[in-house]
Image: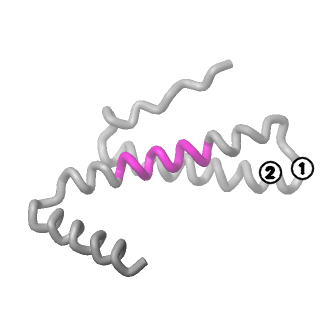
């Protein structure tokens, strides 16, 4: 049974936040259940963790897209400074 893919691009900010809260709660519950008694398919934990990462990535992509050119320039300077200090 294939799991349907999340369509994050079409979601609003509120839907994205609620989806993130739901996925994080489900992930924590699944981790607890797996530690306590084991679950039938532990690969579901990985898929859920990746879904949380996808949601966070989409949120960050939208945040960067909404930045002004000055904010993007400052972000680029910070990233360059961090690379230099490595």
Image coloring type: one colour
**Is the residue 76 above or below the residue 57 in the image?**
below
Q: Position of residue 28 (x, y in %)?
A: 67, 55
The residue sitting at the bottom extreme is 85
Q: Position of residue 7 (x, y in %)?
A: 41, 31
Q: Is residue 2 left or right of residue 15?
A: right
For the point 74% across and 53% down, which residue is it? 31
The answer to whether the residues at label 2 and label 1 have Cβ atoms under 8 Å apart is yes
Secondary structure, magenta segment, majority class: helix
- Element under label 1? loop
The residue sitting at the top extreme is 1
Residue tagged by mark 1? Answer: 37
The magenta-colored residue range is: 48-59
For the point 36% across and 72% down, which residue is it? 83
Residue tagged by mark 2? Answer: 33
Q: Nearer the viewer, residue 86 or 25?
A: 86
Q: Quadrant of residue 41?
A: top right
Distance from label 2 to label 1 (Cα)? 6 Å
The residue sitting at the left extreme is 69
For the point 50% across and 28% down, which residue is it? 5
For the point 29% across and 77% down, which residue is it? 81
């Amino acid at each position: 049974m294939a799991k349907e893919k999340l369509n994050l691009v079409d979601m609003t900010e509120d839907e994205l936040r609620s989806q993130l809260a739901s996925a994080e709660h489900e992930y924590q519950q699944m981790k607890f259940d797996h530690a306590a008694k084991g679950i039938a398919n532990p690969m579901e934990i990985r898929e859920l963790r990746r879904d949380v990462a996808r949601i966070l990535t989409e949120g960050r992509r939208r945040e960067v897209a909404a930045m002004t050119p000055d904010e993007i320039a400052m972000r680029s300077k910070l990233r360059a400074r961090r690379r230099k200090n490595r």
